Image: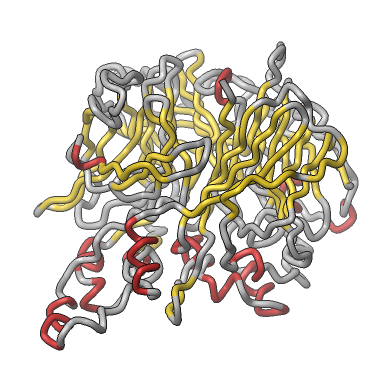
């Protein structure tokens, strides 16, 4: 096992500052990681190597696409696959594994007809051959209906777990036996047509999320809050409310967003130049094009950061601008000395969606290398937003007075501040392909000043390393083993933790070259050394997100 220290010398002779020299050559095929698998509804024991700490008492739940065809019909995009919920249960140093497909309407309709009946982001369902010629003709004028295939994340509202995608439909699930319990529609509680799969949580359990609403005049962004407690045992999203609404810069071309940032008192919505052409959405079926055809990158447009007081719902009249970048996941945000520090994983272009078509992921040899080398890398950056800009604030000086930060922010008008971020990494990170899927010690350090974050390095189209970043000196530790592909790192604090990184990192590791060789990896979060692994004789596709659910 290769555990590279903070200031490792691997490939130092080949490193070129600010480049990805040496990457993207002779990449291993990853086609098996985007292949359909069967579910494992009955628990199977794992074979333990090393030690799984006995204090870990709970389950790592993972969610992602796991079925990519029905009959003779095939999905086009990785994001299209049917959702599968995976569970690694840890108790007294032992581990068991189970998995089940989400019984969404999409899954049930597709299974019943043995063909793709429900459109996903990269695939348009074809007309039902059982319809007559007139029905098939008029069906071309229908809009694509939102899918309930919740394959993106596992989220929590009022103590219950839900599988979520980025439409208005979620499914409540039982984390014990992984059964699908009920479909929940956001639009039955608040006036939104879609919602993100990355909510944030206050310490009291209040949840915040974002969702779009669409009308005759175009799109509106909405901030949503959900109360922490149930009034009745069968409550889902009762009590949810729109905290505020934000008008897009272009209502016919709103921004796509995957997440948003939150500090102690504020929410930050990032209106990025990844745009959605609503006219193309309306005409997808007529044109025979998938939803992703309506998403495009517009590098001529600046990124706009909207600041919202999460207590009052007031949107700040001051808008924070930055040059065009794309963002899927934020790392953390906190307030200090009159500034809001917002840490993000940033791409310099917004075309990542195009990379993850299945035909790209299933290529091999030079064709696979070419796909990898065409993609932008995500890098961690910090934006510093001044919170107290007034009419008297000068326009000719950097408002960031923090001596430890190289970020800048200049007032450019009475309602505009232009921000230039600080890199949260050194040149070494380029040789690991950047960093995405960030995680922190969320329970204790979300919305607070912090030192460490964890993520995945991308020397391939899927993550091939785990990284621990130290913000004090912008150095990092790495876990890497050739030919293995780890999932996002999930931090679990130890029960007697006194320091930020007291705990373990959990990650599910896959091998495309070895059949049924999945294992749960457990790292010491402080040293980043391997403590143990739990091998299970199953195949898993590469997935998206997960959470640790502590046993009670």
Whole-percent x, y for residue 159 in the image: 42, 25
- Give the camera-side residue of 197 and 56: 56
Residue at 37 percent of width and 64 percent of height:
120
Whole-percent x, y for residue 550 in the image: 59, 25
- Give the camera-side residue of 139 and 113: 113
Whole-percent x, y for residue 295 in the image: 35, 62
Residue at 37 percent of width and 54 percent of height:
104
Whole-percent x, y for residue 282 in the image: 20, 66
* In-image side of 397 versus 10 (left or right): left
**Position above or below: 125 against 87:** below
**Position above or below: 243 against 448:** below
Q: How is the image coloured?
A: secondary structure
**Position above or below: 206 against 245:** above
Q: Quadrant of residue 116?
A: bottom left
Location of the C terminus by quadrant is: top right
Residue at 69 percent of width and 47 percent of height:
44
* In-image side of 102 versus 472 (left or right): left
* In-image side of 282 versus 432 (left or right): left
Q: Is residue 145 visible?
A: yes
Q: Is residue 414 visible?
A: no
- Give the camera-side residue of 242 and 263: 242
Residue farthest to the bottom? 133
């Amino acid at each position: 096992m290769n555990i590279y220290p903070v200031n490792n010398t691997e490939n130092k002779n080949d490193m070129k500052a600010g480049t990805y020299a040496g990457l993207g050559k002779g990449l291993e095929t990853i086609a098996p990681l985007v292949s359909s698998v069967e579910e494992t509804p009955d628990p199977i024991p794992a074979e333990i190597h090393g030690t799984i700490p006995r204090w870990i008492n709970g389950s790592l739940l993972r969610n992602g696409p796991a079925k990519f065809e029905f009959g003779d019909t095939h999905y086009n995009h990785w994001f299209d696959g049917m959702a599968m919920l995976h569970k690694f249960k840890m108790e007294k140093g032992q581990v068991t594994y189970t998995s089940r497909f989400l019984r969404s309407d999409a899954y049930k309709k597709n299974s019943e007809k043995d063909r793709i009946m429900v459109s996903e982001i990269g695939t348009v369902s074809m007309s039902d051959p059982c319809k007559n010629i007139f029905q098939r003709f008029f069906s071309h004028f229908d809009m694509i209906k939102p899918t309930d295939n919740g394959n993106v994340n596992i989220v929590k509202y009022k103590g219950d777990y839900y599988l979520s995608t980025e439409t208005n439909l979620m499914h409540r699930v039982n984390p014990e036996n992984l059964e699908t319990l009920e479909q929940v529609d956001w639009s039955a509680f608040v006036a939104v047509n879609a919602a993100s799969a990355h909510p944030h949580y206050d310490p009291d359990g209040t949840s915040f999320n974002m969702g779009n609403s669409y009308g005759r005049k175009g799109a509106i962004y909405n901030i949503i809050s959900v109360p922490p407690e149930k009034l009745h045992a069968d409550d889902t999203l009762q009590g949810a409310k729109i905290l505020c609404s934000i008008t897009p810069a272009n209502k016919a071309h709103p921004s796509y967003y995957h997440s948003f940032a939150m500090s102690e008192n504020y929410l930050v919505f990032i209106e990025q130049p990844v745009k959605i052409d609503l006219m193309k959405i309306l005409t997808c079926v007529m044109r025979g094009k998938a939803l992703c055809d309506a998403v495009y990158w517009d590098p001529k447009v600046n990124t706009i950061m909207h600041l919202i007081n999460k207590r009052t719902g007031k949107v700040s009249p001051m808008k924070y601008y930055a040059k065009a970048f794309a963002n899927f996941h934020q790392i953390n945000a906190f307030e200090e000395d009159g500034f809001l520090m917002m840490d993000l994983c940033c791409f310099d272009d917004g075309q990542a969606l195009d990379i993850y078509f299945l035909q790209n992921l299933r290529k091999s040899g030079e064709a696979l290398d070419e796909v990898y080398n065409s993609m932008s890398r995500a890098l961690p950056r910090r934006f510093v937003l001044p919170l107290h800009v007034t009419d008297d604030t000068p326009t000719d000086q950097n408002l960031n007075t923090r001596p430890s930060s190289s970020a800048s922010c200049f007032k450019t008008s009475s309602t505009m501040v232009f921000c230039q971020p600080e890199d949260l990494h050194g040149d070494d990170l380029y040789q690991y392909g950047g960093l995405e899927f960030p995680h922190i010690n969320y329970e204790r350090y979300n919305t607070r000043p912090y030192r460490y974050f964890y993520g995945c390095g991308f020397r391939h189209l899927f993550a091939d390393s785990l990284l621990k970043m130290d913000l004090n000196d912008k150095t990092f530790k790495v876990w890497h083993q050739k030919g293995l592909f780890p999932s996002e790192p999930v931090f679990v604090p130890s029960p007697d933790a006194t320091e930020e990184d007291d705990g373990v990192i959990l990650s599910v590791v896959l091998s495309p070259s070895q059949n049924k060789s999945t294992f749960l990896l457990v790292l010491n979060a402080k040293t980043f050394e391997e403590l143990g692994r739990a091998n299970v004789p199953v195949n898993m596709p590469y997935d998206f997100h997960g959470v640790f659910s502590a046993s009670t």
